[in-house]
Structure formats: structure tokens, C-alpha cells
Image (cartoon, rainbow, N blue to C red):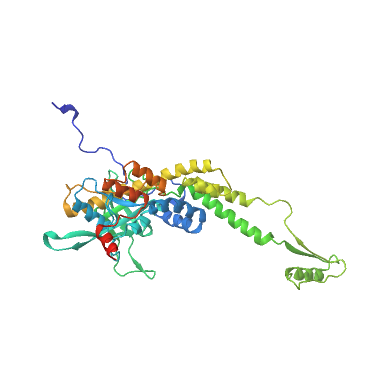
Amino acid sequence: MADTNHAAPTAEIGYVNGSADGWLQWDDDERVPELQWPQSVHTYSRMLKEDGRVSSVIQAIGLPIRRTAWRIDPNGARDEVTAFVADNLGLPIASAEPAGRPRSKGRFSWGQHLQTALLMLPYGHSFFEQRYRVVGEGRAARFHLHKLAPRPQKTIAKIAVALDGGLESITQNPPARTGTVVTGAKEREIAVSRLVAYVRDPEPGVWTGSSLLRPAYKHWLLKDEMMRIQAATARRNGMGIPVGTAANEGDQVEVDRMQKLASGLRGGMASGVGLAKGQELALLGVQGNLPDMQQSIEYHDKQIALAGLAHFLNLDRGGSYSLASVLNDTFVQSVQTFAESIGDIANAHIVEDLVDINFGPDEPAPRIVFDEIGSRQDATAAALVMLRQAGLLDDDDIVKIAVRQSLGIPAARTDTTTAEEGAA
């Protein structure tokens, strides 16, 4: 008999988001005004576009995720449901011979979606609005995924959060045209039921997420200043400053002539200058030693790479293979985790929504899966022989297909194709 004195709680007493208006995103712990949302979006955009090391860190994380093979795992779902989801997302079905790709024009593209979703790395968040198209009529009608329309970070004005920390909606700024607000344009509020939200390492109730670039900000700022000083130093002192000395002390007219002569000095094959006795003209550099800006710039470059665990980017001046391998292992694990996060969100809010709308909430749903980052190996003759001896390439068609997919081997030819080739 259940203990009625210890009934299971069915409601929350505490809260996550305590702001009065429900959408305030001010971070009390963020002391840099430029990094308070939404101003932070513009700051991170500058970092991404203006700094080669920042861009390389983001690409080093994003490209392996985009490059790995993504598939649809049946996960116990019916063949009809699995095929429907795979067709909508344009992804192959795991352990099944690949079918011909349908025409891509006007259809959803997983590759393009993945590229935009990965903008959560620099900005902390990436939102999409679901849109479907109806195919068929009556009971045969199906809602196909037409697009997941990106809602750019720079257009978002508000993020509404419930008391329990759950996302309620986002609000976009009024659309503008040629710099002026469209007549009658209003803010666009999009409910969570139509959203797919990718958020990187969020604190509870903070749907702006955490930018990968936040720890690198101070290093980017100081590096940028150091590079400007280095350029100014080269411009001002790189070739020395021409200095003319008059022969007659106190003769201001001669001093002015020497100053004009020094200012007009130019190098070249036919360059020359004539001086009277006692006059001097010299190129003078900086006296003493200048601070080593390059060393400071390289230090900040290394710290920016560490923000993304991309330690191997700091081995451009040499390093042992074993050290590079150890550092790469940590980086690959972080990339794998980012990819798993994207897969989990896509399964919950793309695949399951698609199944719920078309087949009902009780229908088992397939899952989006991907090859483990860095796991793919080149297929060699020796490896294939070992697989064959182990029976992995014989008898079981599902295992054969899975091995081909993991090794990137083309699909087996059908009997029809073989017969046609033999007749030819």
C-alpha cells in the first residue's frame, strides 16, 4: 500500500527564471557590456570575421561534424515511418542499400541545416522555424518537412522563458527595407511549438547559451591591439626617419631647407642628395629596444585555440607526433559531444515532431545517427580479407551493408544491372 504521507510531487514550488517580464536576458555576472546579449551577437560576429585564428577554431570543430556520415536508424520504427523520415531529411537509412537521391530543389537539406545549426558555437544559440507542405489529399495526405527556416541571431529581440526555465517563444525585430522600417511592420513572435532551438551549454533558463568564443574575447581584444601597434611601429620606424642637420647653428632658413630636403627624401635607382660642407643627412631608427609584439600576438593566438580545445593548432612551430595525438584525442571527444547534442535536439524536435504530425504520438520514431567522429578508416585489402574470414562480409546482408557504409564502399550492384551488363 502506498504511503499517503509521502505523495509524489506533481507541481513545482521553486523556479528557474525569476524575471518579472519573463524575457529579461541580462547576465549579472557578465561585466563586459559588449558581451551582454544581444550586443554580444555583433561582437562575436566581428571576432569570427576579423580574426583568422578564431575562424580556424570554429571551422576545426564544425567541419568534422558536417563531414561525417549522418543516417536514419530505424530504432524499431515501421519501415513506412523510417522511409518517410529519411525521405524528408534526405538522409540514407542505416543498414539499407542506398537509394537514388531525389531532386534537391525546393526540398529540405540536412547539410545546409547542419551548417546553420553550428552557428550556436560562436553565438551560443541557433533558432529555426518549422514549415511543412501538404502532399496528397484526404486520409492519404502527409505533412512533409518543407524547410527549417533559420531565424538569425541578429534579428532576435526577445527570448521568452517560463517560470520553470522552459522556452516559450522568441520575438524578432520588425523586418526592415533599405534601412527604413516597413510601414505597419510589427515584431514577429514565434511560439516554441514551431521552433527548433540549438543552444550550446546553457545554464538553466538561459536560452542564449554560452558562446565558444567567450573565453577567447580578451585575447582577441589584446591581440588586435598588439597587431595595430605592430603595424604602426613598422609604418613609423620601419625605414628610419630622415634627419637633416644644418651647417650653421642658429640659421633658421638653412634649418627649414634641411627639413624640406629630409621630408622629400625618396629611395630609388636615381636617388641622390647634395649637401654643403658641414651639413648632414641621415636615416635614424629607434634608439634602444622595442617591445616584442610578435611574441605577445603568438601567445594570444595560442590562448584563443585553447578556448576551443584545439590545442593542435598551437603545434605549427613543431611538436612530437605523440603529443599531437594526445591533444587531438581531447579535441575529438569535444567535437563528438557537440555532434551528439545536435543529434539529440534534432531527434526530439524534428524527427519526433514529423512522426507525431503524420502518424501520431504513440508511433515509434526512428533516430538520426552519425558515424563517430574520427572513426572512419580507409578500407585496405588486408582489412577486407580479415572481415571476410570473420564472416562479416558473408551471408548476412545487413552486416554487409553496414560494413560498406562505414568504410565508404559503393553499394552492391543489383541482379538486373549485372544481367544488363552481361548482355551488353
Residue at point 21%, 38% (across, down): 11
The spot of residue 336 in percent (x, y) is 39, 45
The spot of residue 12 in percent (x, y) is 24, 38
Q: Number of numbered discs present?
A: 0
Quadrant in which the N terminus is drawn = top left
The answer to whether residue 311 is seen in the rendering is yes
Observer-nearest of 219 and 77 = 77
Observer-nearest of 97 and 105 = 97
Q: Residue furthest left?
A: 138
Q: Is residue 261 left or right of residue 385?
A: right
The spot of residue 41 in percent (x, y) is 41, 55
Quadrant in which the C terminus is drawn = bottom left
The spot of residue 265 in percent (x, y) is 74, 69
Q: Residue furthest bottom?
A: 270
The answer to whether residue 206 is seen in the rendering is no
Q: Quadrant of residue 184?
A: bottom left
Q: Quadrant of residue 357?
A: bottom left
The correct choice, above or below, for 169 with respect to 205 in the image is: below
Q: Residue furthest front?
A: 423
